[in-house]
Image (cartoon, rainbow, N blue to C red):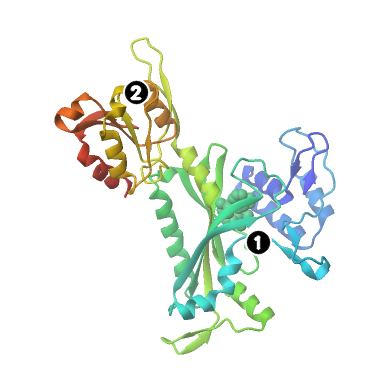
Amino acid sequence: MIDNKDSKKRYRVDHLIEAHAETLDKAAGEALLAQMDELLKNDDFNGLRDLIIANNIKCSVSGTLNWTDVRQFNLMFSTQLGSVSDESSEIYLRPETAQGIFVNFLNVQKTGRMKIPFGIAQVGKAFRNEIVARQFVFRMREFEQMEMQFFIRPGTQKEWYEYWKEERMKWHLGLGISKEKYRFHDHVKLAFYADAACDIEYDFPIGFKEVEGIHSRTDHDLGRHQQFSGKKMQYFDPEINQNYVPYVIETSIGLDRTVLLVLSEAYKEEDLSKDGKEDSRVVLSFPPKLAPVKLAVFPLTKKMVCLNWPRELMADCKQDFYCFYEEKDAIGKRYRRRDAIGTPFCVTIDHQTKEDGTVTIRHRDSMEQERIPMSSVRELVRQAIR
Ligand code: ATP
């Protein structure tokens, strides 16, 4: 880490230099990153500070080069296990969720009778002592990761890496987000154990930033577990009659960061002014399958509260998806409140419901309303959230 003495702002040195490299042309950027990697490898802190000053990398807040020395920062949180604290009881909170998967690799393979290739995925908390948190859920000290380790035969990593790049991008586009909002960022300088790595970046309101990492990690992780635990991490491949330590393709995506992505994508302020009358609304256009509340049920007026239909409709739907009931305020106000938290469908029950069993369904994005039989509401919503 390094601090700017004027703004008192703290930076991670690698992030500071990387951000600057992005502003340079490709060759100059790569040269700068290569210099940085060399200095990092040698723990040359003075050299890193000199590099920052030589490249005129200023603090974005104060605009000055008034930097402190570079200091080491521990990215892992340590704590004590057990009641007697001595050095041997020091443990660390996991900075990623992958370890559990590697340790349990053989358990899962044997009990699940799995054949390579196969993957293990999980979601869980990870902890990093980030230097600059305070970026809403984009970067936190306690966050949630969704990781997958995909175990493959050595030598097939190139194809599987490409396969997972494509599959993961398909997943992102499947959220209903346009292609232009995403890009791949291929790592030029690789970690010593990796043979390919890239990030999937999304165009947040603060610019293109990583949401997911895809890494071809060779047999590094399982190999190291085997080496230090003395326990074999090998798989017998019946197709080629051979034992080997599998290679791994890893996909790692932040759950909280993905929520931020979905929120950034969905948030809209719309101007609805018409005929000189000013009007506007805030709407969260979540794809229906991601909306936390799928359906709101409203009796048109308080008088209808005593009728049974709103309750009947709620009872019909709430086993299948999350619904919300409300009778307060004018109907227009209720619609706007639902727009603001992204409920895709609102159903209003009125006098006509008694006569012909129909209700008004209002669509969040188009604000269009139509009359449909109350008995078809559940199926309509179910189809939309599949
Ligand atoms: P960054 O470059 O943003 O620090 P990273 O390269 O350290 O991320 P990975 O170790 O590849 O991230 O972690 C995988 C994913 O976990 C990231 O793509 C991101 O979505 C998420 N993530 C990482 N650190 C944090 C954090 N501090 N808070 C929230 N999400 C995080």
What distance separates the C-alpha of mark 1 from that of mark 2? 49 Å
The residue positioned 29% from the left and 22% from the top of the image is 303
Task: Assess disc 1: are there few (<14), some (14-19) or many (≥20) residues with their C-alpha within 10 Å of its C-alpha.
Answer: some
> First in sequence: mark 1 or mark 2?
1
Residue projecting furthest to the front? 306
Image coordinates of residue 141 in percent, x first then y, are 66, 50
Q: Amino acid at mark 1?
A: Arg
In the foreground, 104 or 133: 104
Q: Secondary structure at mark 1?
A: loop
Q: Secondary structure at mark 2?
A: helix
In this rendering, is residue 198 above or below 268? Answer: below
Image coordinates of residue 67 in percent, x first then y, are 82, 42
In this rendering, is residue 306 above or below 224? Answer: above
Residue projecting furthest to the top? 276
Q: Amino acid at mark 2?
A: Ile
186 displayed left or right of 94: left
Task: In the rendered structure, find residue 331 and report the number of the disc placed on it.
Answer: 2
The residue positioned 25% from the left and 34% from the top of the image is 309
- Residue 187 seen in the figure: no
In this rendering, is residue 273 above or below 235? Answer: above
In the foreground, 110 or 2: 110
The residue positioned 40% from the left and 26% from the top of the image is 336
For disc 1, the marked residue is 94
The residue positioned 82% from the left and 52% from the top of the image is 71
